[in-house]
Image (cartoon, helix red, strand yellow):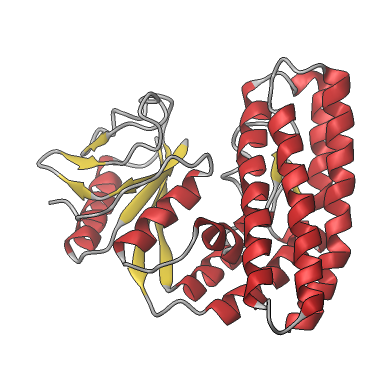
């Protein structure tokens, strides 16, 4: 069986690509900027002390799950599985995923990347590919029992998605901005060692480049993902400002300034993503970007206070 109209777009932030596909399936009309911004992901950053490419995936999702409800959907973690799990464990989770699909609820997996599971055939799940030429990290199928497509090892979580209500934009904006501020002020609530979030993530990133990790895959991938998120943060600020266009000039001024700054941050991260970019210039740009991020905190404080 296969659910119709379940498609995953080519986003660097594959979790957001999964959500785009789920929201389209449930016919919830919302912009890409609202998905990134409304869940708070546009403001997240998570950097390993060796700038590992796992940064975009290994953080606390608890608050994120709650904010998804404002978009009208729920995301439920069905469990984590590794090579230590038995064949019976695999068969049980496969049945659970098939049962969800049979009820019309899209599913996804996270093993290296987030991939939608829109259906299944006799001996395998069908999985969406955000990038067609990356079969090693995003296989187009998952064979029942063996999971042989996970050639890099099994460290897989499965999720399912349900429609739980209607889009609540007022609550979404308020709560997402509160979360964004908390990501800056209390990042340890949403990260765990050896990762760092908020402004501390930039300190760790800069140290990682100084330690020689700035020309590796993880540096490039973190820059690609977090740069995309900041570009969406800029677009989200534009949408928040437009929502108050006729009622509050101060909100428009704040969101306009934040949008400009987030676009500059996104541009900086796109530049430093080049693994061959000179280390000295890479460090300088990351330090400048840290200061830009720090400057957003006061804007966010004022915005949260006005919109509360």
Looking at the picture, how far across and down is residue 5, in whole percent? 24, 54
Looking at the picture, how far across and down is residue 264, in whole percent? 77, 44
User: What residue appears at the point 74 percent right and 22 percent down from the top-left corner?
Assistant: 213
User: What residue appears at the point 66 percent right and 62 percent down from the top-left corner?
Assistant: 238
User: What residue appears at the point 85 percent right and 62 percent down from the top-left corner?
Assistant: 297
Looking at the picture, how far across and down is residue 296, in whole percent? 83, 58
* Identity of the residue furthest to the left in this view: 122
Q: Quadrant of the C terminus?
A: bottom right
In this view, 2 is above or below 136: below
In this view, 153 is above or below 103: above
In the rendered image, is residue 160 in sight? no
Question: Which image quadrant is residue 219 in?
Answer: top right
In the rendered image, is residue 20 in sight? yes
User: What residue appears at the point 62 percent right and 35 percent down from the top-left corner?
Assistant: 224
Question: Which image quadrant is residue 283 in?
Answer: top right
Apparent side of residue 296 relative to residue 48 in the rendered image (left or right):
right
Residue nearer the viewer, 8 or 201: 8
Apparent side of residue 266 relative to residue 292 in the rendered image (left or right):
left
Looking at the picture, how far across and down is residue 248, in whole percent? 75, 82
Apparent side of residue 24 relative to residue 304 in the rendered image (left or right):
left
Apparent side of residue 83 relative to residue 263 in the rendered image (left or right):
left
Residue nearer the viewer, 277 or 140: 277
In this view, 61 is above or below 13: below
Residue nearer the viewer, 231 or 142: 231
Q: How many marks?
A: 0
């Amino acid at each position: 069986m296969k659910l119709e109209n379940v498609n995953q777009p080519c986003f660097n932030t594959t979790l957001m690509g999964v959500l785009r596909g789920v929201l389209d399936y449930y016919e919830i009309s919302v912009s890409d900027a609202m998905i990134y911004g409304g869940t708070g992901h546009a403001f997240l950053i998570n950097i390993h002390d060796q700038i590992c490419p796992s940064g975009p995936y290994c953080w606390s999702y608890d608050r994120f799950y709650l904010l998804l409800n404002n978009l009208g959907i729920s995301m439920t973690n069905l469990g984590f599985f590794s090579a230590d799990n038995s064949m019976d464990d695999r068969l049980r989770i496969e049945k659970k995923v098939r049962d969800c699909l049979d009820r019309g609820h899209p599913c996804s997996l996270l093993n290296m990347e987030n991939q939608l599971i829109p259906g299944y055939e006799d001996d395998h799940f069908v999985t969406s590919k955000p990038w067609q030429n990356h079969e090693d990290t995003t296989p187009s199928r998952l064979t029942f029992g063996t999971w042989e497509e996970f050639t890099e090892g099994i460290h897989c979580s499965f999720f399912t998605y349900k429609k739980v209500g209607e889009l609540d934009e007022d609550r979404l904006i308020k709560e997402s901005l509160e979360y964004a501020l908390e990501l800056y002020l209390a990042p340890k609530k949403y990260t765990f060692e050896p990762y760092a979030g908020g402004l501390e993530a930039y300190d760790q990133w800069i140290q990682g480049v100084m330690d020689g990790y700035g020309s590796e895959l993880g540096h490039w991938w973190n820059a690609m993902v977090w740069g995309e998120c900041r570009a969406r943060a800029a677009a989200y600020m534009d949408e928040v400002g437009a929502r108050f266009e006729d009622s509050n000039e101060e909100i428009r001024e704040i969101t306009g300034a934040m949008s400009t700054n987030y676009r500059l941050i996104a541009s900086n991260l796109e530049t430093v993503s080049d693994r061959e970019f000179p280390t000295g210039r890479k460090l300088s740009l990351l330090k400048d970007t840290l200061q830009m991020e720090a400057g957003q905190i006061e804007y966010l404080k004022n915005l949260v206070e006005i919109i509360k």
